[in-house]
Image (tube, grey):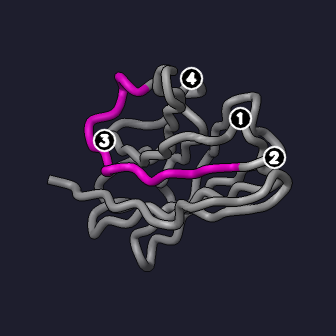
Amino acid sequence: RPALVESGGGSAQAGGSLRLSCAGSTLTSILRCVAWFRQAPGKGREGVAAVDTGGGGGTAYYRDSVKGRFAISQNNANHTVYLQMDSLKPEDTAIYSCAGRYGICHAVISPTDFDWWGQGTQVTVSS
């Protein structure tokens, strides 16, 4: 059973940056697609970014509201997927979770497509 552990959450000012990490011993070797989701209070879970881990580094997908600000990347040597978040906005405040699936990524990052989940980490952006 893949175990995913997030870290790197915290607080930032608007315009600031945070980097989230998602680690797991089988993360990039078994899970073909790894994604980041977020859930703000009173809202549903939404896909933020996803990366196809196959082939040593694959295609990345982003929701429109984070394009140009967030970047997803992977390090196969330490079985970690990162989410670099720049130009943060208060509306980015949410619990961020990483998730994995055995199949390839899709352009639409839907939580129902993912089988394995981390516990989540809080990101708070103040204005």
Question: Disc 3 marks which residue?
Answer: 102
> Label 3, label 4: how many angstroms apart (C-alpha)?
16 Å
Q: Which element type, helix, strand or loop, lies under badge 4?
A: loop
Magenta-colored span: 111-125
Q: Which mark is residue 110?
A: none
What number is the disc on residue 91? 1
* Image x and y of residue 80, in percent: 45, 67
Residue 127, disc: 2
Alpha carbon of mark 3 to alpha carbon of mark 1: how far? 31 Å
Labels 3 and 4: the sequence-earlier one: 3
Instruction: Tell me: residue 114, above or below residue 124.
Output: above
Mark closer to the chain start, 4 or 1: 1
Residue positioned 67% across, 63% down in the render: 18
Res. 108 mark = 4
Work out how far the residue at label 1 is from the one at label 2, CA to CA, in angstroms: 10 Å
Task: Determine the residue located farthest toward the bottom in the rendered image.
Answer: 77
Q: For the point 39% across and 49% down, which residue is it?
A: 120
Q: Amino acid at mark 3?
A: Tyr
Single out the mark in the foreground, 3 or 4: 4
Q: CA distance from mark 3 to mark 2?
A: 38 Å
Q: Position of residue 49 (x, y in %)?
A: 59, 41
Disc 2 versus disc 4: nearer the observer: 2
Mark 4, other Cα within 10 Å: few <14 / some 14–19 / many ≥20: some
For mark 1, give the secondary structure: helix
Q: Is residue 31 magenta?
A: no
Q: Position of residue 100 (x, y in %)?
A: 36, 45
Label 3 secondary element: loop
Circles 4 and 1: CB distance less than 8 Å? no
**Closer to the N terminus: mark 3 or mark 1?**
1
Dot 1 or dot 2, earlier in sequence: 1
